[in-house]
Image (tube, grey):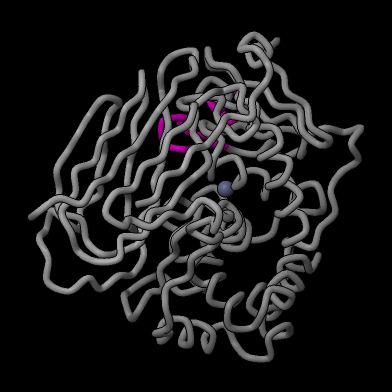
Amino acid sequence: MALVTIVSAACPSPEDANDDGIVETSHLRITTTEDEPICKGTGPFLQRELERISATLELPLWSPDDKLEVRLGFGAVEELCSAHDPDVINGCADLDGKAIASKGVLYSTPHELAHAVRIWNGPLVPRMFEEGLAEILSGSDGYPWYVQFPRGMGWPTPAELLAVPPEEFDLTEYIPSQSFLSWLWLTYGRDQLMALANDPRLADGDPATLFEEHYGFSLADANQGWVDEDGPDPVWGAPCLPEQTFTLDGVFEIDGVLDCADPEVIGATISMSAPPMCLVVPQNTRTRITFEADHGYLSIVEREGCDPGPTSAEATRDKFLDAGETIEQDIAGCRYRMVLASQEPGFPPTEWSIRIEEIAG
Ligand SMILES: [Zn+2]
């Protein structure tokens, strides 16, 4: 039996979290158009993400005197991203490199941060590179980004992706773009990909010629290697943090306080969320899962490759519990991400507990 208690390290009163709505870090000025506080972990998380993204792209950050405006919320996207339908997109980066807007904190804001770092450092290059890199970089440790290889499916070739005009480059092109760039990165290394993506000639030059100059083989050959790739699908960011990974051994119990004033809690728009957790279920079993809290929800989702052997359809289904709910379900012997979050207006704090107990099938 495992029993873990997370003691909230938050000291400030809730009023400190509900400040004037502006959070500054060394390189960011963060606001939200939603009627929610910016949770204490949001600024440090986005600053860390910015530094990770800048280092990965091999591009420097701006001076702390020139803070990037990070505008969070649906209203911010409506306002800044007026060239697009705000119902369709999650965010955008201003082309002067001074502001980004995003509906949520996780994934979509790091995506726009990647655009901001690249815009700051030079002209935009073909969207296959800009969007492919932003998608890959939106994942980080604890917040994995899952990418698929084409495996012979009839996806657009890199040459076709490069031929799409920027204004027509659509969400449907993101999937093959991030997949092809992932393949290049994992097969030939990050440095070589960044050397090409950061080549100033790429903005106006012929991308196929520049590709061949950097890689020593043609785009058509690269397409063939990508389509034929039979290695595991890429995951960007470690799905599970070791210190937040627990194993089900009869009974698993954990409790804590979800508090917007906690330095680990992230949120500013739709929801506030606790640091991500993982649960290892050693074998197929049946469980009673109880989630106690004043508000919020718990999701237990499995996205990784896992071969649990014969089991019920229920066992492999994602599990969602609202505060106060108990369910009895089969669960497959796999590793799961556990997401604990709340959309309660105003993000009031709540104590919570999770109990997962193996029961007779
Ligand atoms: Zn983008």
Asked if residue 169 can be seen in this view, the reply is no
The front one of 220 and 5 is: 5
The front one of 108 and 348 is: 348
Q: Is residue 25 left or right of residue 6?
A: right
Name which residue lies at 30% across and 65% down: 282
Name which residue lies at 30% across and 40% down: 355
Q: Is residue 249 left or right of residue 119?
A: left
The front one of 91 and 283 is: 283
Q: Is residue 234 above or below residue 328?
A: below
Q: Is residue 316 magenta?
A: no
Give the x, y percent position of residue 183.
53, 76
Q: Quadrant of residue 134?
A: bottom right
Q: Is residue 225 above or below residue 210?
A: below
The front one of 35 and 76 is: 35
Give the x, y percent position of residue 112.
63, 43
Asked if residue 129 can be seen in this view, the reply is yes
Name which residue lies at 26% across and 39% down: 320
Residue stretch rendered in magenta on the structure: 77-91
Q: Is residue 88 magenta?
A: yes
Q: Is residue 54 above or below residue 350?
A: below
Classified by dominant secondary structure, the portion drawn in magenta counts as: loop
How many numbered discs, if any? 0
Q: Is residue 14 above or below residue 98?
A: above
Give the x, y percent position of residue 198.
77, 65
Quarter of the image where the C terminus is located: bottom left
Give the x, y percent position of residue 89.
47, 38
Q: Is residue 83 left or right of residue 329?
A: right
Q: Residue furthest front?
A: 1
Q: Quadrant of residue 197?
A: bottom right
